[in-house]
Image (spheres, helix red, strand yellow):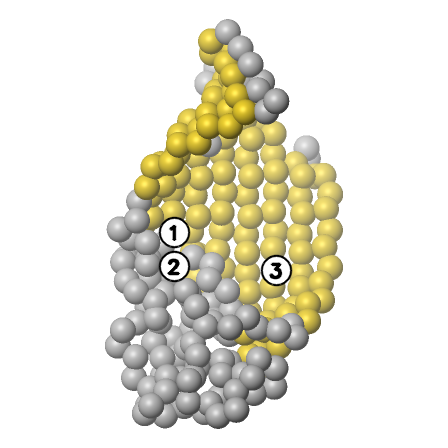
């Protein structure tokens, strides 16, 4: 089921400060679905349910803030050039405008373990090495995503106290071929979301733990232009 009739209002800015590109955004979502990490909680017992006024999932209003920065670093003894990209994301539940009834035969459509606000960060540091071999440049992207605080009821940011780490090696060959090898590791206490210990009479309980704890992977890509 795809939610509809969501209104978004926002404003953004971008500037350069001390040689660093800085951008920010503030927005509010009206009538947005309220979800646990992974999916909406659907109350199948709602009679005459539709995807407008009588939805079987909870809806509400939310506030969102994003701040990002891009910095280019010069060469030194360790690398020929480098870049650092970072972003902080914050959201807050302003109010709940629709919450279907629940009972022994249907789960509570609003997760009870959420917090009103949540914050997460993501950053990538990428040193570059030019002409390592004739016509071959290398980049080593190092990425980190982490859930700083809170358990979002609006969008799935990061698990509480967990996240992911990635390390890659990219090669640009003759400026036409690109090869990339990336390893991604998920960290934080493992768990499921929503929790299988749901008690419809009380509330749905999502774990907000690392649902990808056993999903570390290595990826290889090869692309060219012609």
Q: Would residue 106 appear left or right of 134 to someone viewing this image?
A: left
- Which residue lies at the image location 46% right of the left edge and 28% below the top edge? 222
Are circles 1 and 2 on residues that touch, CB within 8 Å?
Answer: yes
- Which residue lies at the image location 30% right of the left edge and 65% below the top edge? 192
Q: Is residue 196 above or below residue 106?
A: above
Camera-nearest residue between 47 and 216: 47
Whichever of labels 3 and 2 marks the residue nearer the N terminus, that label is 3
Q: Is residue 121 above or below residue 165?
A: below
Camera-nearest residue between 10 and 86: 10
Residue for badge 1: 163
* Residue 154 in view (yes/no): yes
How far across and down, in percent of the image, does residue 50 sit? Answer: 56, 84
Q: Is residue 18 above or below residue 128?
A: below
- Give residue 65's mark: 3
Helix, strand or loop at mark 3: strand
Helix, strand or loop at mark 1: strand
Q: Residues within 10 Å of mark 3 (few under 14, many from 20)?
A: some
Estimate the spatial distance between the alpha carbons at disc 1 and disc 3, rounded to whole Å: 20 Å
Camera-nearest residue between 125 and 43: 43
Residue for badge 2: 159
Q: Residue furthest front?
A: 226
Q: Would residue 55 appear left or right of 36 to someone viewing this image?
A: right
Q: Quadrant of residue 140?
A: top left
Q: Residues within 10 Å of mark 1 (few under 14, many from 20)?
A: many
How far across and down, in percent of the image, does residue 178 sit? Answer: 51, 24
Helix, strand or loop at mark 2: loop
- Which residue lies at the image location 47% right of the left edge and 9% below the top edge? 133
Q: Quadrant of residue 218?
A: top left
Are circles 1 and 3 on residues that touch, CB within 8 Å?
Answer: no
Are circles 3 and 2 on residues that touch, CB within 8 Å?
Answer: no
Q: Is residue 153 above or below residue 129?
A: below
Estimate the spatial distance between the alpha carbons at disc 1 and disc 2, rounded to whole Å: 6 Å
């Amino acid at each position: 089921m795809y939610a509809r009739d969501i209104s978004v209002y926002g404003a953004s800015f971008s500037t350069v400060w001390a040689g660093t590109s800085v951008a920010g955004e503030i927005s509010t979502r009206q009538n947005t679905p309220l979800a646990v990490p992974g999916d909406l909680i659907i109350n199948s017992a709602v009679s005459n349910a539709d995807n407008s006024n009588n939805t079987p999932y909870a809806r509400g209003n939310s506030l969102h803030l994003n701040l990002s920065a891009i910095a280019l670093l010069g060469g030194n003894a360790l690398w020929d050039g480098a870049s650092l990209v970072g972003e902080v994301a914050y959201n807050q539940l302003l109010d709940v405008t629709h919450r279907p009834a629940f009972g022994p035969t249907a789960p509570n459509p609003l997760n009870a373990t959420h917090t009103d606000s949540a914050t997460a960060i993501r950053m990538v540091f990428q040193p570059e090495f030019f002409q390592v071999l004739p016509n071959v440049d290398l980049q080593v992207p190092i990425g980190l995503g982490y859930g700083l605080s809170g358990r979002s009821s609006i969008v799935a940011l990061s698990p509480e106290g967990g996240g992911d780490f990635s390390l890659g090696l990219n090669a640009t060959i003759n400026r036409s071929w690109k090869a990339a090898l990336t390893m991604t590791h998920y960290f934080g206490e493992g768990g499921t979301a929503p929790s299988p210990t749901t008690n419809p009479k009380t509330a749905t309980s999502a774990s907000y733990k690392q649902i990808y704890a056993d999903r570390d992977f290595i990826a290889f890509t090869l692309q060219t232009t012609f």
